[in-house]
Image (cartoon, helix red, strand yellow):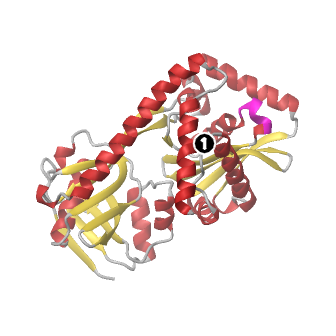
Amino acid sequence: MSAARGAAELTGAAPGVEVEFFDPPLAPEQWGRYERAARSYTCSRAFLEYFDRPAAATLAIVRDHAGGERSAFLYRRAGASAHVYGRYTAPSGADLAAFCDALFGRHRELRRVQVDLVDALPDPRALGRPALVVRHVTERRVSLPGSVEEYERTLGKDTRAQLRYLERRLARDHPGARFATAEGDDVPRAWIAEVVRLHHARMASKSTRSTIDAAYEEGIYRVARAHGAVTALLDGDRVCGGVVYVLAGPEVFGWVIGHDDAYARYRPGKLCQVAAFRHCIARGARTYHFLMGDAGYKRELGGAPAEVASYAVLRSWASLRPGDVARVVARRLARDARRVVAQADRLAARLFPHRPAPLTTLARALAGRARAAART
């Protein structure tokens, strides 16, 4: 394996920071270093590509002056662009700046570096290079204390009462119902398949097309057995609901959730989520990421908003291309359109309470038909 080092001077950082590159193919110990330094991953198709270990991936480790590993970045280069894989929680602006500077110094022909979603930087100008915010979203995160009792005390009074009521009602109506969690190699293939099936049904009921196909489902199963867990609601041997999540040290990332509509009166998705929290707290997790979306249950279960963004870091403004600007503008317009639809739906809900979110439902249906027409 070849390894090249590139030093990067950081404004306001300790002297002697350097970036070490490891070219493909990466040895198993290098993947271990990446996992230890990056600590968290994206729950998406990009994550599955990472998990499949693409042959063209290069690893970059940011070290401090004492040799400690501060951050890790996995990237692939295509022509004048480099794309960083994975979702990283809170890489410092100094580490990201060091990585980009070293990368531009290593590849003279490189014009832009695009980073997948990371915790939004307080001031992107601290990178020391021009940067575009390609995508900006809000996710919900739950801070998990040291015990289940402490977590439950953080919930609102009404939420605690509702959870107790739902658990008692479920136990009364279905004495054989129970929550179970399987982690790592113990994750059953059947549980993943059933949660994905219930997820498809849940998306279809909201006129939304699920992105999970057979290959994605197989990837979820492999990832869950290597880095994740499944918490399921079982009625006998039947899976009535479940949540699949990725475990990354103190960070946990919710991935797939689904439930049987026949049990909807018990809010099985919410109960599975709480059962997953209990498992995560017991194993020492400190943050649960709901990822994108602002569903009501996320707020009720203690999810606080956190800003995340994807950045395109440019070598210089001369490297800016029309396509870069077009992508940013298109995403901004789409975000503004969703806000307008959401506001109109809140008004429509007052006029037509029996039809929740009619405009959103219509927009999703039209988008689904457009995608179907494009495929044919």
- The percent coordinates of residue 193 (x first, y second) are 71, 58
Which quadrant, please, contains the N terminus?
bottom left
Res. 132 in view? yes
Res. 66 in view? no
Q: Mark 1 packing: few (<14 Cα in 10 Å), some, or many (20+)?
A: few
**Could you tell whether 8 is left or right of 370 in the image?**
left
| Residue 67 vertical placement versus 293 (above, below) | below
Name the one closer to the observer, 333 or 67.
333
The residue at the point 64 percent across, 26 percent down is: 355
Which type of secondary structure does the marked residue at label 1 adopt?
Answer: helix
- The percent coordinates of residue 324 (x first, y second) are 26, 55
Magenta residues span 262-267
Which quadrant, please, contains the C terminus?
bottom right
Name the one closer to the observer, 276 or 120.
120
Kindly identify the amino acid type of the residue bearing the numbered disc 1: Ala
- The percent coordinates of residue 157 (x first, y second) are 61, 17
Name the residue beneath numbered marker 1: 282
Does 29 appear in magenta? no
Q: Quadrant of residue 278?
A: top right
- Badge count: 1
Q: Main secondary structure of the magenta part?
A: helix
The residue at the point 69 percent across, 35 percent down is: 271
The residue at the point 21 percent across, 50 percent down is: 131
The residue at the point 40 percent across, 76 percent down is: 26
| Residue 180 vertical placement versus 191 (above, below) | above
**Could you tell whether 27 is left or right of 180 in the image?**
left
- The percent coordinates of residue 112 (x first, y second) are 23, 61
